Amino acid sequence: MNKFVSIRRDLHQIPELGFQEFKTQQYLLDYIATLPQERLEVRTWRTGIFVKVHGVRPTKMIAYRADMDGLPIEEETDVPFRSRHEGKMHACGHDFHMSIALGVLTHFAHHPIRDDLLFIFQPAEEGPGGALPMLHSDTMKEWMPDMIVALHIAPEYPVGTIATKEGLLFANTSELFIDLKGKGGHAAFPHLANDMVVAACALVMQLQSIVSRNVDPLDSAVITIGKLTSGTVQNVIAEHARLEGTIRTLSVASMEKVKERIEAIVRGIEAAYQCEATIDYGSMYHQVYNDEALTAEFMSFAEQLPDIRVIRCKEAMTGEDFGYMLAEIPGFMFWLGVDSPHGLHHAKLTPDERAIDKAIALLTSYIAWKGNN
Ligand SMILES: CC(=O)N[C@@H](CCC[C@H](N)C(=O)O)C(=O)O
């Protein structure tokens, strides 16, 4: 079996949540230690890793970023290398992202080029966000790249296809946590309590009106409540409810407007259901905005490769803290086709591993060209 497919399978079995990627970090460090070390300089940052590959006569530094964390999802595939960590899964392809990064790093550890390269293995992309603090780390102050690239697997595209666009690619995001506190009681005496199951259900429904009634139909926004918890047992009125969700918008102005409307609706729920509410926005991610010139140049480069098909896609409401890096460093992100019947964040995601070699070959040839020109 191809070495980087085998690495992907190893990593797939040990998914860890944000800033807990201890085994993943050790696995990557152990592999990096097997490479020729003459030109490598390795530093750790929390559970992340920086690897600088010193160029022969550097004129600039090109960075490549791979995220490392898994999701709190119980895997439902029947692959022999499925997750060994109960309730956790690489359901967003970060196992692919890391093995591809190792493939490209391996090439350049053996084949030096003119420019410096920086490989960034970044923790906590799914939350609470590793890109921003890593960007502000002492190492990145010292090793500030001149350009940066990352990819994300795309289950909806066939293997051999990549998709991207100049400018806005991914949305602004904000997590959303709302706690409701009322008065619990006996199920038989609702008039003596303030039922937070009923309040939470009303709130979920009212939140839907923000996108349909308050956001310009020609703009785009998403409010998804992915988790709703409340109550203890079937015959007790719940005193507490918690909504956990995410907000996505294509502009910073829309994000502010959506948050204003959420706050107004929550105040209304407090009054109507006689409860107290708190709102916490958790982590927020900057939109992913691709540098126009570098993206167009990369697309033209990839179009000339015989086994790569390039699609100019639309922007997506996904979020990525790589957006913070792109806000300070010119570069781009692109989708890598992996042809899975089940999508990102699905317990049955099964990306086609043939995409790993395609991505390594594409990135290696692009970085070699860019790093010698
Ligand atoms: C590519 C992808 O799926 N990214 C995640 C990023 C999550 C950000 C944060 N935890 C949130 O939910 O807002 C996504 O869900 O888009």
Image: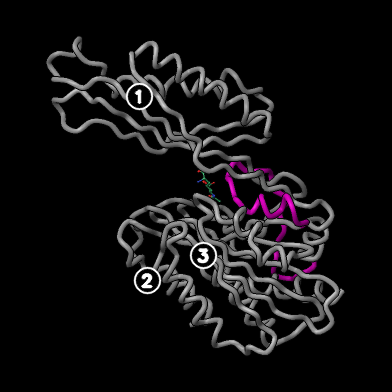
For disc 1, the neighbor class at 10 Å (few under 14, some 14 to 19, many from 20) is many
- Is 317 included in the stretch rendered in magenta? yes
Q: Amino acid at mark 2?
A: Phe
Numbered disc total:
3
What's drawn in magenta, residue-wise?
Answer: 304-330
Q: Amino acid at mark 3?
A: Arg
251 lies left or right of 202: right
Marks 2/3: CA distance?
27 Å
Please give left or right for residue 245 compared with residue 45 in the image. left
Amino acid type, mark 1: Ala
Q: Which residue is mark 1?
A: 200
Q: CA distance from mark 1 to mark 3?
A: 37 Å
Q: Which is more toward the observer, 239 or 200?
A: 239
Q: Secondary structure at mark 2?
A: loop
Furthest residue toward front? 138
Q: Which residue is mark 3?
A: 46
* Residue at position x 35%, y 26% in the image: 180
Q: Which mark is residue 81?
A: 2
**Rendered position, 33 above or below 260:** below
